[in-house]
Image: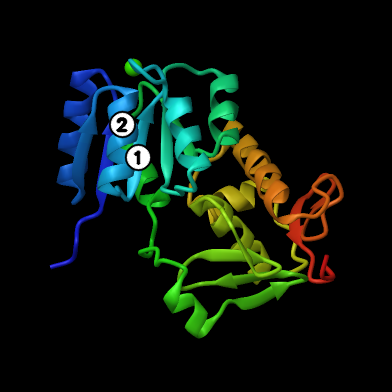
Amino acid sequence: MENKKTILIVEDEKNIVDILRFNLQRSGYATAEAYDGADGLAKARGSNPDLILLDVMLPKKNGFDVCKTLRDEGNNVPVIILTAREEEGDKVRGLEIGADDYITKPFSMRELVARVGANIRRTTELSHSAAERESGPVPLAGNLSVSAESHMVFRSGRPIDLTQREYDLLTFLAAHPNKVYSRVDLMEQVWNYGYVGDDVRTVDVTVRRLREKIEENPASPAYIRTRRGMGYYFSSAAEAQ
Ligand code: CA
C-alpha cells in the first residue's frame, strides 16, 4: 500500500479544520492539526508533513511568521496560505516570504483539494548528502546544476534553497531553453492551474524570488530573462558567473 501524504492543517477555527480534515482524508491524505501558530511551527518541524495549509490570523504566532521561520530554517515544505480576504497585499506578502501558493476564504473544497494536489511534493526529497555525492548533479547552464533525484539546485556547487514551486519553474524553463512562455502559459504548465485571472501576479513574484536566489545580478538576470510584453524564458547563453 502506498504511503499516504500528510497534510498539516494550521487553523484556529475548528469548523474549518473539521471540514478540511474530512475532505482531505476522503481524498486519500493523512492529516495533522494545529490550532495556533506556535503549535503549527512545532508540528511542521517535528512531524515532517508533505504540505502545510496555513491560516494567516492565528493565536500566538501568525501564519506569515510561521512560514518565514520555516524558510529561514531551510525547510522547503510546500505551504499554501489561507488568506481570510481578497487582499492583494496578503497574497503577495505570503509569496514573498516563501509560501508556494495561497487560497482565499471562503474556498470550495474541490478547489482546495486540487491546489493541494498541484502543490504537494511529487517525489520524496532525499537528503542531499550521501546519495548526491555518488551520482552528482547535472549541469544546467552557466554555474547552475541540478539533481532531479533530490530536487536540489546548485550554484557553483553550493546548494540553493528553493521552494518546490521555484524548483519546478526553473527546471521547466530550463528544459525548454530560449522558448518564451507567457505568465498564463506558466500558470498552466508549472502551477497546473486550468484558470488564471489575477493570479498571474504569482508568476512574477516567484520569478523575482528565483532570480534573487540564482542570479549574480537579479536586476540584470542571465538565466531567467524577460521578453517584454511576452513573458519569460531561460537563456541557454548564460555564462558561468
Ligand atoms: Ca484564523
Residue 132: image location, x then y, percent: 49, 76
Please, what is the three-letter code of the amino acid marked with disc 2? Answer: Gly
In the picture, which quadrant includes the N terminus? Answer: bottom left
In the picture, which quadrant includes the C terminus? Answer: bottom right
Residue 148: image location, x then y, percent: 51, 72
Q: Badge 2 is on which residue?
A: 40
Disc 1 packing (10 Å; few <14; some 14–19; many ≥20): many
Q: Secondary structure at mark 1?
A: strand
Splitting the image into four quadrants, where does ligand 1 fall?
top left
Q: In the image, what residue occupies the spot 30% across and 49% down? A: 48
Q: Are marks 2 and 1 in contact (CB under 8 Å)?
A: yes
Please, what is the three-letter code of the amino acid marked with disc 1? Answer: Ile
Q: Which mark is residue 52?
A: 1
Asked if residue 180 lies left or right of residue 106, the reply is right
* Viewer-nearest residue: 41 or 77: 41
* Viewer-nearest residue: 223 or 176: 223
Asked if residue 2 lies left or right of residue 211, the reply is left
Asked if residue 70 lies left or right of residue 173, the reply is left
Does the rendering let one see residue 182? yes
Q: In the rendered image, which quarter is residue 2 located in? A: bottom left
Q: Which mark is residue 17?
A: none
Q: In the image, what residue occupies the spot 64% across and 35% down? A: 201
